[in-house]
């Protein structure tokens, strides 16, 4: 059978744009032609498009007109605008995490530490609703680029749940590392929050996804998150924080630690951590405790390859693993980081869906549950961990 050819366009030209571009080239069931990219920073755009020999568009709408699928690889504050523009033109849209959020009132005085979190919850729910409504009347679909859903370890757990009929009773997991490289991260007006949304969305999406899978396998209905109790802290901004230069400290008005306790509709639970406080590289894992099995999904680090060198200089020009501070001694080398993280698998699934209409595992309903949970979490954290109901969208 002749492979379908789809045209892709990328909004953004930074870190995520690059890994989307690389992952697109690993899609095998569809032929994808990356037409070009658009970014508000022309210089940044050209340094992305020129080496790749793709077109640098001057205008977002122009890019959307000329492609079948649009990738949203821009800061969270811009996601809704680009998603709506793509859906309006009946294009499929692959949107990076977090789906959307609340980014302040635009005033100089806005401060992420102090604004009323109920307002953030109300606004972010409206933002999600606008996108869900737009999707309903569009021929295009929202594909929520939550790579954890497509990480091979999580997809294997999906199979275990579906084939064993297990009930998940307790999950615990984490996404943490020593801090973000993005200049907009740590400023609420661009990122919509700190560790809870920026990092916590990953294990939270995986946990909600797996409960969706469990419910669908049992009776066709996803099991949704019902309440959340959360705490947030700003450890690197404590007056007595001892800065030794290893942990990043650039968080202006966002938290650098979050703890989430989620209760699902069936009364089962998940405990998740997200922080900027962990040395030794990215720490991404989730443990799933069920009524007939227990699974530990190590996304990063894992023991696929471990290497030792007595002196760092031997590994100077070798990529080892994301955000490790040193390559000296033992390292958990990731032989193919994008594969373990699920980047190529999400692109394969999204393009297969765009070409042949397959269902999307990481869809707008999952994205909506994640945002509703996170902003209910911010309300809870403001109330020092009181239980808050999660909206149904
Ligand atoms: N899934 C993951 O593992 C993962 C990893 C990193 C980032 N992300 C997500 O990807 C998104 C982008 O993050 P990043 O690290 O690439 O940020 P970045 O700062 O490296 O790049 C952002 C890019 O967007 C461009 N941009 C800003 N506003 C724009 C607009 N209105 N229209 C078009 N372009 C615009 C900037 O010029 C820049 O090129 C974020 O939502 C982030 O959370 C996901």
Image: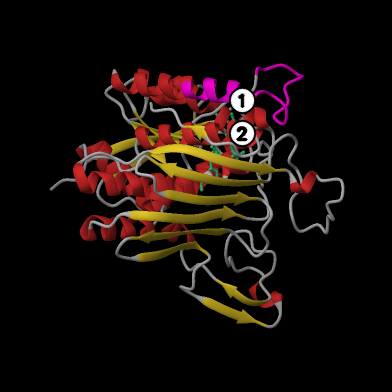
Q: Which residues are magenta?
A: 105-125
What residue does disc 2 label?
191
Q: Does residue 136 appear to the left or right of 187 in the view shown? A: left
Secondary structure beneath dot 1 equals loop
Say whether marks 1 and 2 touch (CB < 8 Å).
Answer: yes
What residue does disc 1 label?
103
Q: Is residue 308 above or below residue 325?
A: below
Q: Quadrant of residue 280?
A: bottom right
Residue 349 lies in the magenta stretch = no
Q: Quadrant of residue 225?
A: top left
If the picture is divided into quarters, which one holds ligand 1? top right
Give how far across and how far down residue 77 sits, in percent: 57, 27
Query: Measuring 50% from the left and 28% from the top, which residue is drawn there?
Result: 79
Identify which residue, 165 or 84, lies in the foreground.
165
The residue sitting at the left extreme is: 1
| Residue 51 visible in the displayed image | no
Earlier along the polypeptide chain: callout 1 or callout 2?
Answer: 1
Q: Which image quarter is the C terminus in?
A: top left
Query: Measuring 37% from the left and 23% from the top, which residue is drawn there?
Result: 132
Identify which residue, 234 or 391, lies in the foreground.
391
Colouring: secondary structure
What's the distance in space between the residues labelled 1 and 2, CA to CA? Answer: 7 Å
Q: Is residue 4 above or below residue 157?
A: above
Identify which residue, 298 or 170, lies in the foreground.
170
């Amino acid at each position: 059978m002749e492979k379908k050819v789809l045209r892709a366009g990328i909004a953004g030209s930074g870190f995520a744009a690059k890994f989307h571009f690389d992952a697109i080239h690993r899609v095998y069931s569809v032929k994808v032609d990356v037409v070009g990219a658009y970014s508000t920073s022309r210089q940044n755009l050209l340094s992305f498009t020129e080496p790749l020999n793709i077109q640098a568009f001057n205008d977002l709408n122009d890019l959307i007109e000329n492609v079948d699928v649009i990738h949203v690889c821009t800061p969270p504050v811009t996601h809704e605008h680009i998603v709506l523009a793509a859906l309006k033109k009946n294009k499929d849209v692959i949107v990076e995490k977090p789906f959307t959020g609340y980014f302040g009132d635009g005033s100089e005085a806005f401060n992420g530490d102090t604004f009323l979190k109920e307002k953030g919850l109300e606004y972010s729910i409206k933002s999600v609703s606008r996108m869900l409504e737009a999707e309903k009347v569009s021929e295009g679909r929202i594909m929520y680029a939550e790579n954890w859903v497509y990480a091979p370890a999580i997809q294997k757990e999906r199979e275990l749940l579906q084939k064993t009929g297990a009930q998940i009773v307790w999950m615990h997991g984490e996404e943490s590392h020593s801090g973000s490289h993005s200049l907009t991260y740590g400023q609420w007006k661009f990122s919509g929050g700190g560790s809870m949304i920026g990092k916590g969305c990953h294990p939270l999406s995986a946990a909600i996804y797996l409960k969706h899978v469990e419910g669908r396998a049992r009776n066709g209905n996803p099991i949704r998150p019902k309440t959340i109790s959360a705490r947030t802290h700003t450890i690197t901004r404590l007056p007595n924080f001892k800065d030794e230069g290893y942990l990043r400290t650039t968080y202006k008005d966002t938290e650098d630690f979050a703890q989430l306790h989620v209760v699902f509709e069936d009364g089962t639970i998940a405990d998740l951590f997200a922080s900027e406080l962990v040395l030794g590289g990215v720490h991404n894992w989730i443990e799933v405790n069920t009524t007939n099995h227990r699974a530990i999904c190590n996304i990063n680090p894992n023991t696929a390859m471990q290497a030792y060198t007595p002196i760092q200089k031997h590994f100077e020009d070798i990529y080892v693993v994301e955000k490790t501070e040193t390559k000296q001694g033992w390292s958990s080398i990731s032989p193919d980081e994008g594969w373990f993280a699920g980047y190529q698998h999400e692109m394969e699934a999204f393009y297969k869906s765009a070409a042949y209409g397959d269902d999307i595992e990481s869809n707008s309903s999952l994205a909506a549950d994640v945002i509703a949970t996170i902003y209910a979490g911010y309300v809870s954290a403001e109330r020092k961990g009181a239980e808050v109901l999660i909206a149904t969208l």
